[in-house]
Amino acid sequence: MTRKASQCVEIEAEIQAVAAGEAEPEAARRVDEHVRECVGCQAELERYQRIEREVATMRNPLAAEPLAALARERLEARLADLRTRLVAYEVITTAVGRILLAASEQGLVLVEYLDRRHDVPRILRDHELEPAEDGGQLDPFGRELQEYFDGRRTRLEWPLDFKLVRSPFQRKVLEETAAIPYGAVMSYAGVARELGRPEAVRAAAQALRWNPLAIVIPCHRVVGSTGALTGYAGSGRTDRKRRLLDLEGVPTARLTSDFRIRPEAMYVLTPGSREYCLPTCSSLEPAPAAHHTAPVLTLGARLFASRERAEAAGLLPCTTCRPDSHPLNP
Amino acid sequence: MWEGGQAAESPAPTATAPRLVDRAGFEALVASHHAEIYRFLLRTTGRPSDADDLSQETFLRAYRAYRSLTPDANVRAWLFTIATNLSRNHFRAQKRRRAAHAAASETVSQHGAPEPDGVMIGREVEAVVSAVVSRLPLKQRLAFLQRKVHGLDYETIAGALDCSPESVRAHVFQALRKIRQALRGHELIEKEREP
């Protein structure tokens, strides 16, 4: 490579600018003067002009079009997936502990108790959810849930996203559970019967072991056939289940080491009926009582904490036992 | 759900599913800018598979951050910045991988530049320019492509490369100079380009 005069070195940037059509008039004049006397730089200018023409062809938007179109298709598929995973979240502190709420654009997708685990982004990732930037969007959910805990709200019919539900059967169980009114309880056996699969009691209980939408899908309103408050929130937290039932007015009693609901102190709705009865009503089917089980629970009845709760569910008092004239003692 | 909560005692719930991303707005953004960002990444990486991955990652990141974008933001510049950062990460990772495979000896080929004193016609010039661009140091290549091919201004490119506009000018200058040097000694004959 030949060594260039310092003048030629200095003017190279301006030669580039002239070739690109970006030079200031002053610089263009200097280049013009220089190349008239310098054959080498004249050739450089021509090369740069040639390069500019070549670069212009690189700007052609049609150049990579088929490849770009394929990439775009793949992008759309990944965006569709991301849309289902992106969630806003919020942590609220309640009487039963800290609760994580997460919602996608379809609706509430996760309501989880934060016990030992506090790394929320990690929890979301474990569920294959992705936290969206920005917050505050779930304030209405948090506020209404607090109203529930304060006893000022009996309705939480929110838009739900069942994305985290693990099987169609679990979804059916959750939907059946979601239909149990505030202040009412039902047994796992009852849920299984309602689903038309009375033999699937264990499977129904299993399906409720992990409920992605705690409280909102009220699995705390499902009890064992003995009335026992069996495991809750995955770790036998029956204290939590009891607090929620207390809140909703469901009477409970202490067993030796655990709690059960008191079916004898609750109004009864037998499957298919629209009337609620006293637990002693003669119209109730006598059932062969297995050891320790509450017959009405085994048969799939719903039990209501109070007349108020039963009537809020649209039920009428039974005309045989007249719970309206002889209410249970609270 | 919770059937029977219909009694007037409790107010109807008002919470609604959150709107996380303005979908129509983002679709318009993809329609306007995807092809260009893809071309930029294809020139930057030289490999369709890498351009594919990096362009997807660019727009997925943009989707996640779209809410926080201010209405007066320069969307195109913003996308170039994301694509530039991802490219630099990509090559950094690649460099580390190559270093890890240090056993493989120096295999960087020197193809591309024809012997000097030849005659270059039409497409040969194009091939040389492309080859030189593809071998530019990354920052020069990124600056050159954004300035010369995509016409972004120096300030914008400086933002994407996290350096001064003067450095961007210097990178572009050096890039052009290398291309020019590769063409030196060749008689450049224009030829009608194939359609």
Image: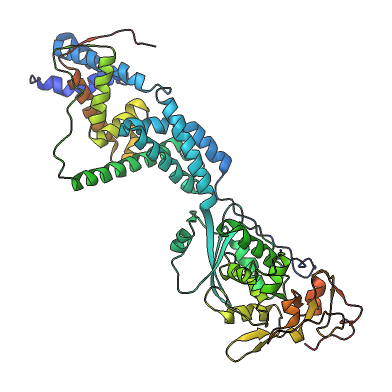
Q: In the image, is residue A232 above or below residue B115? A: below
Could you tell me which quadrant the N terminus of chain A lies in?
top left
Expressed as whole percent of the image width and height from the top left, the position of residue B116 reads: 14, 16
Numbered marks: total:
0
Query: Please, which colouring scheme is shown?
Result: rainbow
Q: Nearer the viewer, residue A118 or A202?
A: A202
Q: Nearer the viewer, residue A199 or B86?
A: A199
Q: In the image, is residue B85 above or below residue A229? A: above
The answer to whether A262 appears left or right of A50 in the picture is right
Q: For the view shown, which residue lies furthest in the right direction?
A: A319
* Rendered image quadrant of residue A104: bottom right
Residue name at image x 49 percent, y 35 percent: A73
Expressed as whole percent of the image width and height from the top left, the position of residue B188 reads: 22, 11
Residue name at image x 81 percent, y 86 percent: A328
Residue name at image x 33 percent, y 26 percent: B148
Residue B3 in sight in this render: yes
* Rendered image quadrant of residue A220: bottom right
Expressed as whole percent of the image width and height from the top left, the position of residue B98 reads: 21, 43
Residue name at image x 65 percent, y 71 percent: A201
The answer to whether A204 appears left or right of A308 in the picture is left
Residue A150 in sight in this render: no
Expressed as whole percent of the image width and height from the top left, the position of residue A216 reads: 64, 66
Could you tell me which quadrant the C terminus of chain A lies in?
bottom right
